[in-house]
Amino acid sequence: RATTMKISIFGSGYVGLVQSAIFADVGHRVTCMDVDADRIERLRRGDIPFFEPGLEAKVISGVEQGLLSFTADAAEAVGASDYLFICVGTPAGSDGSADLRYVMSVADSIAQHMEGRKVVVNKSTVPVGTADAVEARISEGLTARGVSLPFEVCSNPEFLKEGAAVTDAMSPDRIIVGARSKATIDEFRQMYRAFNRNHEKLMFMDPRSAELTKYAANAMLATKISFINEIATIAEAVGADVESIRKGIGADPRIGYQFIYPGAGYGGSCFPKDVLALRHLAEAQGCPAQILSAVNDTNQRQKQKLGQRLIACLGEDLSDCTVAVWGLSFKPNTDDMREAPSRTLMETIWAHGGKVQAHDPQSMAACQAIYGDRDDLIYCENKDDALANADCLVVCTEWKTFWSPDFDTIKRTLKHPIIIDGRNLYDPGQLEALGIHYYAIGRGRSVVQH
Ligand code: UDX
């Protein structure tokens, strides 16, 4: 059975907006709600608040077809649909726990405005037990209204990657659903029909298992990254090359080539927050989370590496130094600078009195929103401008435009021929032959002292 379903999505961030657009794309009738009325007004005009490849076209086409609408009115969103998705932020609290205030405020709106049967679906990454907590909260709200209405709370975590969010959501590896009733399970099959071709991708389980699946997936991926970064540090100490090691271990299909790239540390809105939230959750249950602590500690150290290397090259006092920084976002194809290694680097440079000349293909506005206008940060239109009169170059993000630069220009322009590469983009042998001092991550000979 292929039937249009009515779906309301609370939250117009990465998860909510992408999910809204792709549900509308396959013919469902979607109402996307956000408390930020300005944002809703802009979305109605097709103005997307962040950079995400392919999203704008899908949003505009959904609106034109009359399948996607936006509202800042919670009552309208609750009334419009039988399926209500919670896709709001779950920021980290000061102790690392996930802050559920936005999730609970959606639950309150639902309890306040619902009239008939609703299925409430948590897509935000939330601690185990949140489906039950949302259920209790909605029950309380209904009791306060003096009504009794049928509803079910499910978990349907999102696994999309920023920069590839639309394609990930269109072709998911798996669709995890934590739901209890047969009717709801059947409706989920209908809702995800267009995304469940080729082979069975829907996996049904209880809500707590679905919630933990999401944390376990992100924690496992973060573990792979911290593991290879630790190997990189050992490789530096013993004079080995982590790039050879990465390929050598990746050839074993049990390890695989994916997600074991050493680098300047993981950033973004998910891994740092989710590793800490899972650790917090485990500890609250009396389970020691030693691996998670180590993964986080290693990442914190890794994010310091670029700054430490810079100081090893130029000295502690950077007051006469200008550093060219290529790449600000936490990874390519996004303008997101949350927890980005570039921020740790720039803050280190500033703490030592130095100046930054930065270029990023997408994140200049995001950077300005965080750091504003300051004398020690110059925003450069292109990568060559960032090099002008700079002492050395640091690469923080592996945008395609940084992969094959003109090394002669770099050498001619920089005051010192030094490249510090947080993403292992270049060939140490080639750069050595060109007379460039190259410091990468875990690459034996490339880390000889300047
Ligand atoms: C991640 C998960 O991949 C996604 O499934 C989940 O839904 C949300 O969190 P995202 O944060 O968008 O997605 O980015 P991702 O591409 O996973 O990269 C995360 C960080 O890890 C980046 O800082 C990246 O540079 C770093 N990374 C990734 C490495 O350092 N090495 C790698 O091999 C892979």
Image (cartoon, grey):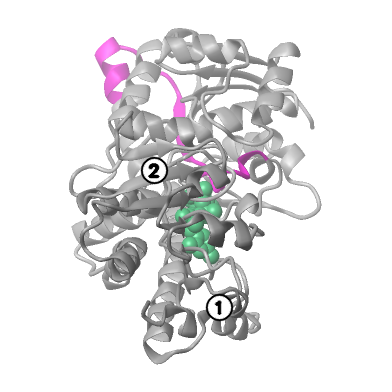
Q: Is residue 39 above or below residue 183?
A: above
Depth check, mark 1 against mark 2: the one in front is 1
| Residue 184 falls left or right of residue 97 | right
Q: Position of residue 30 (x, y in %)?
A: 62, 20
- Determine which residue is flagged by label 1: 432
Residue 235 location, quadrant: bottom left
Q: Which SS class for mark 2?
A: loop
Q: Is residue 449 above or below residue 25?
A: below
Q: Which image quarter holds the N terminus?
A: top right
Q: Which SS class for mark 1?
A: helix
Along the line of sight, which residue is nearer the eye, 179 or 10? 10
Point out the stretch of residues depicted in magenta. 139-166
Along the line of sight, which residue is nearer the eye, 288 or 140? 288
Which mark is first along the chain, 2 or 1? 2
| Residue 195 falls left or right of residue 420 | right
Q: Residues within 10 Å of mark 2 (few under 14, many from 20)?
A: some
Q: Residue at x 39, y 43 (%)?
A: 338
